[in-house]
Amino acid sequence: MKLIVKVFPEITIKSRPVRMRFIRQLAKNIRAVLRDLDPAVVVNGVWDNLELETRVTDPKALKEMGERLTCTPGVAHFLQIDEYPLGDFDDITEKCKQHYGNELAGKIFSVRCKRAGKHPFSSMDVEKYVGSKLRRECGAAGIDLKDPEIEVRIEVRDQRLFVIHSQHNGIGGYPLGALEQTLVLMSGGFDSTVAAYQIMRRGLMAHFCFFNLGGRAHELGVMEVAHFIWKKYGSSQRVLFVSVPFEEVLGEILGKVDNSHMGVVLKRMMLRASSAIADRLHIDALVTGEAISQVSSQTLPNLSVIDCVTDKLVLRPLIVAHKQDIIDTANEIGTADFARHMPEYCGVISVNPK
């Protein structure tokens, strides 16, 4: 099977050295996530897309390959194709008939051609010729460029012809390992898991920092969802899970801090501790799942007070997200069930918060 992997469009507007570095990193990441399914997988390409070839034929393994590619940061989409040497227009038509001929009878269709390289013809020339001939020879009902029932998709790249079978969308973003690292403050709930996904989807490596307020069971639960997110979206890179015992800190807060201030003070202490951990790991940015005014500690004044304890950049990818949108995203990425069964230990201190 051969796939054409299209890179995230923002990569293509980078300078030549940055663009090539990002694409090399993406190729390396794809090999890493597919290695256990096919140790001999071949991934080549250095400019605007990557070509992936595998000799694996098991349908289950091929399906798993596709699912992993859709979750790999840096992949905009990928195409399953058959490749042929480029011939004349009649030869292109014959190759299209082999793959689409039986589907076109009685259907409204269009021909879409993309072209790269120098040729004595345009993409539109190919579309007109192939479309006209397929209509006559395959019994199609007609051609409609705006709303066809079937799209016959081909690409001409230099002296090669690609006939496209299907397209699968990826999550986009930049490839992991090409940008900086972050430390995600992880509670295991809806917000922190979606924030971690958003960061990884953009291409930032996410290490996980968990503040344990509920003992070993809580720790294992958060480790499980962190591993799930890493395995699905970031397994091309090795990351850390840092667990910080915080019960005694919480105990001091409960004994020495006014009820109304406990939430803010606890978050300040978490930010202090995570900043120290980030320093040791040479990480410059922290990530939280906070959204404006979702709870009292997340008002603008309180977020400002919390941030005062660190010089680190604090990233909040969900800062303007609605709770239902966050829950919907958690359902889409597979973390919602973990979050629904995760105890909310911070809730024990939310008494008359300011």
Image (cartoon, grey):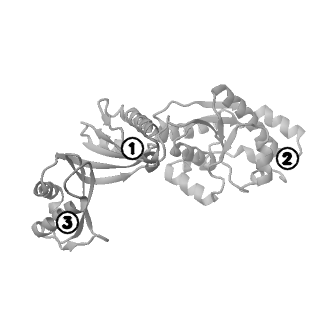
Name which of mark 2 and mark 3 comes first in the sequence.
Answer: 3
Whether residue 73 is situated above or below residue 331 in the rendered picture = above
Kind of element beneath mark 2: helix
List x then y, in percent, for residue 131. Answer: 18, 65
Which of 335/28 is in front?
28
Q: Quadrant of residue 220?
A: top right
Tell me the kind of residue under disc 2: His
Residue 245 appearing in the image? no
Question: How far separated are the C-alphas under marks 2 and 1?
Answer: 46 Å
Residue 2 appearing in the image? yes
Q: How many marks?
A: 3
Whether residue 184 is situated above or below residue 162 in the rendered picture = above
In the picture, measured across the screen, residue 297 lies left or right of residue 74, that is right
Whether residue 206 is situated above or below residue 137 in the rendered picture = above
Q: Residue at x 36, y 31 (%)?
A: 36
User: Contact, CB < 8 Å: mark 2 with mark 1?
Assistant: no
Question: How far separated are the C-alphas under marks 3 and 1?
Answer: 34 Å
Q: Residue at x 60, y 60 (%)?
A: 324
Q: Quadrant of residue 19?
A: top left
In the picture, measured across the screen, residue 222 lies left or right of residue 91, that is right
Neighbourhood count class around disc 2 (C-alpha, 10 Å): few under 14, some 14–19, many 20 upward = some
- Residue that extends furthest to the top in the rendered view of this protein: 280
Which mark is on residue 128? 3
Q: Residue at x 56, y 50 (%)?
A: 336
Which mark is on residue 69? 1
Q: Nearer the viewer, mark 2 or mark 1?
A: 1
Name which of mark 3 and mark 1 comes first in the sequence.
Answer: 1
Which residue lies under the disc numbered 2? 261
Which of 295/144 is in front?
144
